[in-house]
Image (spheres, coloured by chain):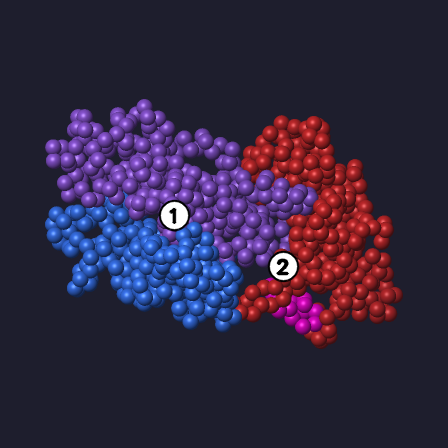
Amino acid sequence: MISIPESEAAAVVGVGETAALAEPRLWRRALRSLAHDPVALLSVLFILLLVVVALFAPWIAPHNPLEQFPNGLSDVGAPVAPGARFWLGTDQAGRDVLSRLIYGARVSLLVGVVATGLASAIGVVVGTVAGYAGGIVDSVLMRVTDTVLSFPILLFCIALIAVTGPSTRNVVLVIAFAYWTYLARVVRSQVLSLKEREFVNAARTLGVRHATIVRRHVLPHLWPTIIVYGTLGIATSILIEASLSFLGIGVPLPQASWGEMISEGQQYFQTAPWLLVAPGVALILTVLAFNLAGDWLTDLMDPAEREGGR
Amino acid sequence: MIGWVARRFAQMVLVVFGVVTLAFVFAYLVPANPARMVAGPQASPQAVASIARQLGLDRSVWSQYLSFLGRLLHGNLGVSFVLQGRTVASEIATALPYTAALALGGVLWEIVLGIPVGVIAAYRPRSVIDRVATFGALLGLSAPPFWLGLMLIYFLAYKVSLFPINGVGHPLIWYLILPSFTLGVGGAAFYSRMVRTTVRQVLRSPFIEFARLKGMPERTILGRHVIRHALLPVVTMLGMDLGYFLGGVLIIESIFGIPGVGQLAYASIATIDIPMITGTVMVAAVFMVLMNFIVDVTYTLIDPRVRLRRGR
Amino acid sequence: MSDAALAVRGLTVHFRVRRGLVGSRVVRAVDGVDLALGPGETLGVAGESGSGKSTIARSLVHLTRPNGGTITLGETDVTSLRGAALRRYRRRMQMVYQDPYDSLDPRMTVRDAIGEALAVRGLSRDRRPGEVARLLSRVNLPDALAARYPGQLSGGQRQRVSIARALAVEPDVIICDEAVAALDVSIRAQVLNLLKDIQRDTGVAYLFISHDLSTLRFVADRVAIMYVGRVVEHGPSLELFAEPLHPYTRALIAAVPSVTARGTKRLHLAGEPPDPANPPTGCPFHPRCPEAIDECRRVRPELTVVGPGRSVACHVAVRSFRSPRSAAEPSR
């Protein structure tokens, strides 16, 4: 039947079928894949646990995280080791480490989620506009992204906070400002390839407005990317928040934050190692859980990218 | 080719210009009064005003911006507000060798740890080595460097006294082993995973099949094909890491007490020494942009197809 | 021109193709093409990949901007429309794409995909479900399919949905760009029959682009054969298939056993089409042409009218028509 040597039509059938089939049933697929992947299951459960702990901190924490207990210091004024009364011991001010850890989860999650959400919003808008509009708009936006990307952002942010004064809001803004560029780049390249898809052309040919095309045919396809990068972004944001708090310019005192706990603990570490071990382990497990969950989501969203790096 | 390099160079200049402008905007928007900072807390209002005039702070934004750019062209980064009589450029020049040594060490650790682990894991997928490497890499990516640094100090420097606890001394390399390891471990984790993926891809490609069919020994295949393919993307990113590290690694320098650019920046932030802050920030950004440029150009020189492929 | 649904004059599309790191070449993907399409008519455009046929389709629906020429739809010159005016015009010319797996948004149900087109037509929300059902039955699909996603449909069903979506805005012209190429042979015939039925009922005109001559023979009233960006032969379908004039057309037809005309010399089409960025001098077909004469290597033949509705761009064919011997003998 095919009369002319023609390659255009040859490889078309079957392409994208599995991906298309899968779209509406993501939830069921997610649950099924979790059942087969204990590591992913564990990390998702850990994140859920963390969320519960953060939400219900006042009911879960055994003590007030800010209270300086008179019996929280030994006779020589040193922190008390873990025991029956204080499960993870006390810190140099006689406060309960476990309770501080639980309240610290609130800070980490709040900052991580809000900062990542903000960064994603900026990144998606910039990436979509640059990719969809193309031309001079694309060039300008990408040069701006390059500039921010090559800026020593942490240093800059520290300077900014040092000047404006530490506050949770500033920490969130600073992290969002540092992370949006990554998403902008990824989203842009995705939009560039989406723009070439025939269903976008079909909508254009119908006379659908650009804004409607973006809302209806472009943004919905970006969700997998946003979810994956959002999850990895939360891990990164939590690390940055801890670093800022470690440097003493993160979440303001006396609010408990894991980074700040490590920072304060380092002077007493030789005699009270639990001051470093507890928040450090909490931090590693949390970041690890988000990273693993991100990997799992990458596989889930795009089966073709299994074995993918990062 | 020349046209491309010229365009890429113009892009770089544009980004540097953007960075410099951002730094100026920052310095301008800072609420603290620089003239007051220079004059000191006891100075009279008249003295503050005269210093402001000397510093040109009473002129318009645009005029200040232009003279800021003009000074930069002459390599003049300004004078420290806090350290009397010291120029920003000379302070950075003193700190830079330490940062450079630390940065090189960090990149070295990334190579020494990341590449072999990645190659071995790729050759033995799902083996014990692979699983340990994968998990170790995830741990390395997830551990906050400041915590890792403190742990290393506690166990290897304090408990066992294998290494100096902090500061710098003679020989310098001795003092840099732990900090550079802390610096490089995250990147090493990242590269081990990246190398694993690329090597797996290369091993599955037809020309490796062919080489095996020809009877080429596995060692030759590894040396001639696999490593070369796996290394190219790593080298680019290593170059960018180096650029990033050269800007000063604030947290690691401060934990280990290394008087590098990062420490300098941190100290100047604490004292709100505006010229020093903008100076260090700019130097760091320029390193980053410059390394990016160098990596891009050498990469394209080695393999012209790369640009086309990456352009897609 | 007023009786034409669509008229294309001198359409030219150039692409700039990068060669290596510096330098670029201009590819004349479409090089001065004239086409005319009457209401209710089907014009077939045939050619190998790279002949520019798809580029014509894309510039007609304004996905590619032409470098020269005019596109007239009814009475309106639509070549350089932009913005809102362009959106109004787009409705009148629709396209059915080759790839049924890519031309429907995988995240949108059939109802939403057709509903989007109805919204463009300005149909109020409450009247859309009825219209979706009507359009689905028009393309012989059950109404129950409206709630499905494209991933849950077969290739033929998707292509029918694409046709229904195109019909939803009541266009004057539908461009079918390899619209059945990706379908199984049995389904292909069904879809082609459906397109014919629709044309009979609505009077829509088709510009049917295909590399497959048997498809064109089945649907097209007239056929234009393209080679490297130009029309090399043009004529009523019956005549063109019965008596192809251009050696290239003959080679194409000869390659399709079922449509081989009696008396046509079987030709083997040797070699590949030339690089469009670097076409040969003279007639672009001459390196592959068994009948090439010296003139073919030097002078590019223009498209010349050789009979009612028939034209050809070939020195040899035109010469044989002009010679007295050939004129004396009836061509059929």
Secondary structure mostly taken by the magenta-highlighted segment of the chain: loop
Which amino acid lies under the numbered mark 2 shown in the image of this protein? Answer: Gly
C142 and B94: which one is in front? B94
Q: Residue at the spot x=73%, y=52% of the render?
A: C81
Magenta range is C270-290
Which residue is at a point 12% across and 47% down the rendered structure image? Answer: B159
Q: In the image, what residue type sits under mark 1?
A: Ile
Along the line of sight, the residue nearer the viewer: C287 or A60: A60
Q: Is residue C317 left or right of residue A217?
A: right
Q: Chain of mark 2?
A: C
The residue tagged 2 is C50
Q: Nearer the viewer, residue A287 or C156?
A: A287
Give the residue pinned by disc 1: A161
Location of residue C121 in the rendering, given as x and y in whole percent from the top left corner: 73, 38
Give residue A257's quadrant in the image: top left
Chain B drawing hue: blue
Secondary structure of the residue carrying tag 2 is: loop
Please tell me whether residue C279 belongs to the stretch shown in magenta. yes
* Residue A164, x across and y down, in percent: 40, 47
- Specify the label residue B238 is tagged with: none
Which chain is red in the rendering?
A: C
x then y, percent, for residue C299: 73, 73
Q: Colour of chain A?
A: purple
Residue A208, position as x, y percentages in the image: 66, 42
Work out whether residue B265 can be spotted: no
Q: Quadrant of residue A116?
A: top left
Subunit of label 1 = A
B260 on left or right of C4: left
